[in-house]
Amino acid sequence: MSFLEHLEELRWHIVRSAVAVMACAVVAFIFSRFIFDYVLLAPRNPQFITNRLLCRLGEYMNMKALCINEHPFTIQNINMSGQFMADIMVSLIAGVIVSFPYIMWEVWKFISPALYDKERQHARGSVWAVSALFLTGAAFGYYIIVPLSVDFLGGYKTSEEILNQIALNSYLTTVAYVPLGVGVIFELPLLMIFLTKVGVVTPDFLKKYRKHAYVILLVLSAVITPPDVFSQMLVVLPLGLLYELSIVLTRRTARKHQQTIDSIENG
């Protein structure tokens, strides 16, 4: 295929992915009332599953502080088109999250013809692995980071004279964007494996620059979370574990890659 033919093929993969996102976004927009009432606003409710489990753990350990989000705060909208634009934004984010496996499938369909049979065989299942890591990260962000952040930020007061009446856009920034950002960050191990296979990084490189990597992870956590140290620490902890997991996986990948090279040279 010529360069222009490759561009044409890529264009159709992008078009199909965009159609999938828009189709899912339309469905999300139709069910927006359900999404807002039972998904987005749920973490601030004491009956949310994370809040209930933490409260039970707090009762068992005699730690009342673990009962979070017991006093839901008020969320207000002050813009004429605020709720409509929030609905559009949430629908698009939901469309991206729900259609993510299909988007990865389109990416795979585009790059797989350029792979050798052995490379294609080793990469089999990568679409599911990427999708699983993304959805796991999104679930971690929604069920762990969001309720803890909502409780901390929504209940934090500098004075009893100041009431917390949270703006709708501010609340949605935490609840909607954090799961999406954490889902992307959870792709770190697969990214490291890919960079190892193409020879960009090595396990020794990752170990040598571990301190620098943790600084970068802190910056990433600051980008995908609300501007508070509490939420950033909640993100940095799993990212640190993912980085250490990446070192283990890249060591195994580098070993297998070297064995393949040795078998080719000896064969």
Image (cartoon, rainbow, N blue to C red):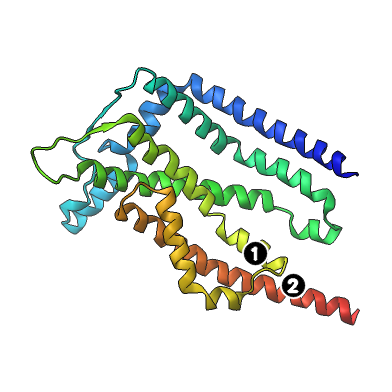
Q: Which quarter shows the C terminus?
A: bottom right
Q: Residues within 10 Å of mark 1 (few under 14, many from 20)?
A: many
Q: Residue furthest bottom?
A: 266
Q: What residue does disc 2 label?
A: 257
Residue 150 locus on image (x, y percent)? 29, 42
Residue type marked 2 = His
Q: Residues within 10 Å of mark 2 (few under 14, many from 20)?
A: some
Residue type marked 1 = Ile
Q: What residue does disc 1 label?
A: 193
Mark 1: secondary structure: helix
Residue 25 locus on image (x, y percent)? 55, 27
Q: Which quarter shows the N terminus?
A: top right
- Of mark 1 and mark 2, the one earlier in the sequence is 1
Q: Residue furthest left?
A: 161
- Residue 8 vertical placement versus 192 (above, below): above
Residue 118 locus on image (x, y percent)? 83, 61
* Image-based side of 120 in relation to 55, left or right: right
Residue at 65 percent of width and 31 percent of height:
18
